[in-house]
């Protein structure tokens, strides 16, 4: 069956051509008699559901899809000249689609970078807060081993930070190491409420 699906055929810096079909999502009620499988969809242009690379011509790229599937309708054709930035972005999306393990590793590194930036911000917030031991704080703890960008289970404690050895703690949980000047790694968020007296 021939179904129109939005796609792009682009040229990379090395002159080769690639084709990618955007990930799509149903936008209508699939049980409705008026639902149209072909047209009741939205597209995510930051990812592909099908992609192939390394063709000599845009026609060869399109033929690769048509050979294995059905007629996809029209395609947007983009030459590298004048579109270098966009071509590099499509190359990266294609790389991630064709190399899922490498893409997962890229995500892990990016999540780690965000986590470290998050901890740095929290560290600075604690170091710059006056009267930290007499200011009420709300600390959100991460209770699982997911990254800070994931929706993990959390627990919030509101109260006063207390010193215990080299640690500032709240409700018996470690928050900040006064010796290393580092926030505990299981901290997701810290809100400091400065006392008015």
Image: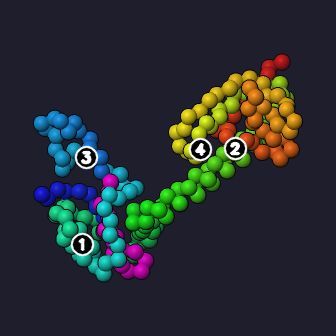
Check contact, mark 3 vs mark 2: CB within 8 A. Answer: no
Q: Which residue is mark 1?
A: 64
Name which of mark 2 and mark 4 comes first in the sequence. Answer: 4
Check contact, mark 2 vs mark 1: CB within 8 A. Answer: no
SS class of the residue under badge 1?
helix
SS class of the residue under badge 2?
loop
Q: What residue is shown at x 49% (from left), y 58% (from top)? A: 104
Which quadrant of the structure image shows residue 51? bottom left
Crowdedness near tag 3: few (<14), some (14–19) or many (≥20) residues, C-alpha within 10 Å: some
Q: Nearer the viewer, mark 1 or mark 4?
A: 4
Instruction: Please identify the quadrant where the C terminus is shown.
Output: top right
Q: Nearer the viewer, mark 2 or mark 1?
A: 2
Q: Between marks 1 and 4, how big is the CA–CA gap? A: 42 Å
Q: Is residue 176 left or right of residue 93?
A: right
Q: Nearer the viewer, mark 3 or mark 4?
A: 4
Q: Which residue is mark 4?
A: 145
State whether residue 181 appears in this view: yes
Q: What residue is shown at x 58% (from left), y 46% (from top)? A: 147
Q: Nearer the viewer, mark 1 or mark 3?
A: 1
Q: Between marks 1 and 3, how big is the CA–CA gap? A: 24 Å
Name which of mark 2 and mark 1 comes first in the sequence. Answer: 1
| Residue 179 horizontal/vertical position (percent) | 86, 44
- Tell me: residue 13, above or below residue 190: below
Magenta residues (range): 9-23
Name which of mark 3 and mark 4 comes first in the sequence. Answer: 3
Q: In the drawing, what numbered circle is on residue 185?
A: 2
Q: What residue is shown at x 12% (from left), y 57% (from top)? A: 1
Q: Which residue is mark 3?
A: 41
Does the magenta run of residues contain 15?
yes
Name which of mark 3 and mark 2 comes first in the sequence. Answer: 3
SS class of the residue under badge 3?
strand
């Amino acid at each position: 069956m021939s179904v129109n699906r939005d796609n792009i055929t682009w040229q990379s810096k090395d002159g080769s051509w690639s084709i990618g079909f955007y990930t799509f999502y149903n936008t209508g009620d699939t049980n409705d008699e008026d639902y149209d499988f072909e047209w009741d969809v939205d597209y995510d242009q930051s990812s592909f559901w099908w992609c192939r690379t390394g063709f000599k011509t845009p026609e060869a790229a399109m033929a690769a899809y048509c050979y294995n599937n059905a007629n996809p309708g029209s395609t947007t054709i983009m030459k590298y000249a004048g579109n270098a930035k966009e071509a590099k972005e499509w190359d990266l999306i294609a790389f991630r689609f064709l190399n899922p393990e490498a893409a997962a590793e890229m995500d892990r590194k990016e999540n780690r970078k965000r986590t470290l930036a998050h901890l740095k911000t929290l560290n600075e917030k604690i170091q710059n807060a006056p009267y930290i031991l007499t200011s009420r704080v709300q600390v959100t703890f991460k209770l699982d081993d997911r990254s800070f960008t994931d929706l993990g289970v959390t627990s919030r404690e509101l109260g006063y930070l207390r010193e215990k050895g080299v640690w500032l703690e709240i409700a018996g949980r470690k928050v900040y190491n006064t010796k290393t000047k580092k926030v505990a790694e299981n901290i997701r968020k810290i809100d400091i409420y400065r006392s008015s007296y």
